[in-house]
Image (cartoon, rainbow, N blue to C red):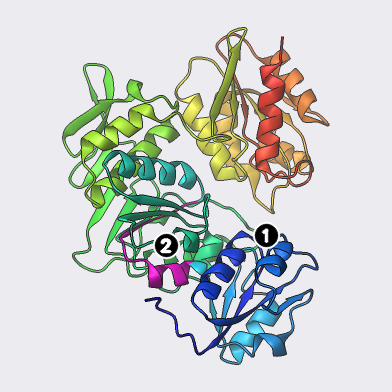
C-alpha cells in the first residue's frame, strides 16, 4: 500500500520529467492533486493534457493563494526553494517536498544513494552494473536516466540512485542503506549563496543513512555521524581498515581493500586517476550492501565509461582526443585535467569555456600550468577563464567548436591529448552538454 494519505490535496510544481513522474504516481494512487509551472508551455504539458485531462494545471507566474490550497507541494528540482511564492506558501504552513521524499517513503528495498559535484553518474552506473552482475534485481535512476518514482516496484531488490543537490533540497529523510557525497567543489553558485549552502544541501543525503562512504581526500564529504555508524572510505592513497585505495607491489598499481590487492589498475578500460577513484568509490558502496568482490571486479574490467565523461574518441597522428563535455563545473574539469595529466607522458591541449554559472575559475590555474601545453577558449566566459589562468600557459581564443578543434590539432604534439573539458555549462552555444559532446566527437571522427 502506498505511504501517502489520499484525503489531502497536493500540487506538483514543475512539469518536467520528474514532475510528470509525480503526476503518474499520484494519479495511480487516486490522490487529489493539481499542477503548476512557472513556464507558459512546460515540456510535458501536451502529455499531461492528453493522458490526464481532468487534472487542473496552471502555467505562468505562481499564484500563492492557489499554492496554499495544498497540504503539500512537490517542487521540481529545477525550481529554487527560495522562489518567493514557495516561501510565502511555506510561511503559511504548506509543506515543501519532492519526488525523492515520496520515493523514499514508498521504496521497499535498500537504497544506495550517491551525490557529489562530479562523477556521480559514473559511480551510480558502475554500482548498478555490479549489482546486476551479482544477480540482483536492481533499479538505477534518479537524477540519471529514469525518474525515481518510475522505478518503484515490489520486485526490486536494490535501488541505486544518483541525487543532485537540487533534489536533496526537498528530501527530508532518505533513510538510505548507504549514502555518499563523492566530492564537493563549487557548482551552481548561481543558485546557492556560497559553498557552505551547497555543501549543506548535498549533506541532506545522509539523513537516516545506516552506513556512509567517505572520500578520504575530501574533508567536505565527511558527515556528522552517530557513534558506531559503519563508515567506509575510498581514496588514491594506500588503504587501511574499512578502506579502499591503491597499493603498489613490484612496480604494479592495484585497486585494494584494506591490506588485500583486488586487481591491477591496468585492467581498467577507463583511464586516469579520477576513474581509479570512481572505481574505488563503487567498490566501497557495493561492499557496504554485500555485493561479492568477484562480481564487482568483473564489472570494473568490462566498464568502458559513460558518454561525454572523459570518453576516448580516437587517436590521430599520435594524439588522443577525449570528450569530457559533462564537465560543466570547475571541479569536474580539474578531475579530468589531473586524472589524465598524471596518467600520460605528453601534455594536454584543453578546450574550455561556455556559461560559467558564476564560478571562480582560479582553481584551474595550477593544474593547467602543470599538465597543459595550451588552452583553447570559447564561449561567453572565455575571458573570465583567461584572466583566472593568467600567463602560465599559452591561450588561444576561438569563436566555434570547429575552430577550437582545428587550433588544438595544430598545437598538439605526438603523445599529447586534446581534452574537451569546458568547466562551464553549454547553454550559451549549445542545447545542452550532450549536443556539445556529440558535435565534438563527430568533428574529431572525420578529421583526415
Q: Is residue 349 above or below residue 123?
A: above
* Residue topped by disc 1: 190
> Would you say residue 393 is visible in this rendering?
no
Q: What crowding class fits label 2: few (fewer than 14 Cα within 10 Å), some (14-19), or many (20 or more)? A: some
Mark 2 in CB contact with mark 1 (< 8 angstroms)? no
Where in the figure is residue 411, as x and y percent of width and height? 70, 15
Instruction: Name the one closer to the observer, 160 or 354.
Output: 160
Q: What crowding class fits label 1: few (fewer than 14 Cα within 10 Å), some (14-19), or many (20 or more)? A: few
* Residue topped by disc 2: 152
Residue 61 sits in quarter:
bottom right
Where in the figure is residue 179, as x and y percent of width and height? 35, 58
Asked if the magenta segment contains residue 108, the reply would be yes
Q: In this view, does 209 lie above or below 234?
A: below
- For the record, the magenta segment spans 100-116
Instruction: Name the quadrant of the N terminus.
Output: bottom left
Q: In this view, does 80 lie above or below 127?
A: below
Point 73% across, 13% down: residue: 410
Instruction: Name the quadrant of the C terminus.
Output: top right
Point 69% across, 54% down: residue: 358
Residue 190 sits in quarter:
bottom right
Q: Is residue 261 above or below residue 97?
A: above
Point 34% across, 27% down: residue: 301
Instruction: Name the one closer to the observer, 23 or 76.
Output: 23
Residue 299 sits in quarter:
top left
Asked if the magenta segment contains residue 302, the reply would be no
> Does residue 218 appear to the left or right of 321 in the view shown?
left
> Does residue 203 appear to the left or right of 365 in the view shown?
left
Secondary structure under tag 1 reads: loop
The residue mark sitting in front, 2 or 1, is 2
Instruction: Name the one closer to the observer, 92 or 218.
Output: 92
Amino acid at each position: 500500500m502506498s505511504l501517502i494519505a489520499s484525503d489531502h490535496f497536493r500540487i506538483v510544481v514543475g512539469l518536467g520529467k520528474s514532475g510528470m513522474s509525480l503526476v503518474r504516481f499520484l494519479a495511480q494512487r487516486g490522490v487529489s492533486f493539481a499542477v503548476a509551472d512557472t513556464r507558459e508551455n512546460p515540456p510535458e504539458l501536451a502529455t499531461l493534457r492528453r493522458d490526464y485531462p481532468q487534472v487542473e494545471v496552471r502555467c505562468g507566474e505562481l499564484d500563492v493563494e492557489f499554492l496554499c490550497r495544498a497540504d503539500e507541494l512537490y517542487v521540481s528540482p529545477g525550481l529554487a526553494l527560495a522562489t518567493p511564492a514557495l516561501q510565502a506558501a511555506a510561511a503559511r504552513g504548506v509543506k515543501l517536498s519532492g519526488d525523492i521524499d515520496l520515493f523514499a517513503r514508498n521504496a521497499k528495498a535498500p537504497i544506495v544513494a550517491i551525490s557529489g559535484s562530479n562523477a556521480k553518474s559514473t559511480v551510480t552506473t558502475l554500482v548498478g552494473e555490479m549489482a546486476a552482475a551479482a544477480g540482483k534485481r536492481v533499479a538505477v535512476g534518479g537524477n540519471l536516466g529514469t525518474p525515481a518514482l518510475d522505478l518503484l516496484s515490489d520486485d526490486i531488490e536494490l535501488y541505486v540512485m544518483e541525487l543532485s543537490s537540487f533534489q536533496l533540497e526537498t528530501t527530508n529523510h532518505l533513510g538510505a542503506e548507504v549514502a555518499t557525497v563523492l566530492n564537493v567543489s563549487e557548482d551552481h553558485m548561481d543558485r546557492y549563496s556560497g559553498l557552505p549552502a551547497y555543501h549543506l544541501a548535498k549533506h541532506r543525503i545522509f539523513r537516516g543513512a545506516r552506513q556512509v562512504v567517505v572520500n578520504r581526500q575530501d574533508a567536505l564529504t565527511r558527515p556528522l555521524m552517530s557513534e558506531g555508524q559503519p563508515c567506509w572510505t575510498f581514496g588514491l592513497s594506500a588503504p587501511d581498515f574499512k578502506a579502499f585505495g591503491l597499493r603498489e607491489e613490484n612496480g604494479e598499481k592495484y585497486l585494494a581493500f584494506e591490506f588485500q590487492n583486488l586487481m591491477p589498475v591496468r585492467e581498467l578500460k577507463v583511464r586516469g586517476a579520477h576513474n581509479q577513484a570512481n572505481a574505488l568509490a563503487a567498490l566501497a558502496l557495493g561492499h557496504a550492501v554485500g555485493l561479492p568482490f568477484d562480481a564487482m571486479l568483473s564489472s570494473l574490467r568490462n566498464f568502458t565509461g559513460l558518454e561525454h565523461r572523459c570518453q576516448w574518441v580516437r587517436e590521430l597522428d599520435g594524439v588522443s582526443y577525449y570528450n569530457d563535455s559533462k564537465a560543466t563545473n570547475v571541479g569536474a574539469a580539474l578531475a579530468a585535467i589531473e586524472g589524465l595529466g598524471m596518467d600520460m607522458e605528453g601534455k594536454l591541449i584543453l578546450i574550455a569555456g561556455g556559461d560559467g554559472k558564476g564560478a571562480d575559475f582560479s582553481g584551474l590555474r595550477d593544474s593547467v600550468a602543470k599538465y597543459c601545453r595550451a588552452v583553447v577558449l570559447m564561449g561567453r566566459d572565455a575571458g573570465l577563464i583567461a584572466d583566472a589562468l593568467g600567463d602560465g600557459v599559452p591561450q588561444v581564443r576561438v569563436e566555434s567548436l570547429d575552430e577550437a578543434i582545428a587550433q588544438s590539432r595544430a598545437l598538439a604534439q605526438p603523445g599529447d591529448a586534446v581534452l574537451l573539458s569546458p568547466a562551464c555549462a553549454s547553454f550559451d552555444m549549445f542545447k545542452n552538454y550532450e549536443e556539445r559532446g556529440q558535435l565534438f566527437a563527430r568533428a574529431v571522427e572525420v578529421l583526415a
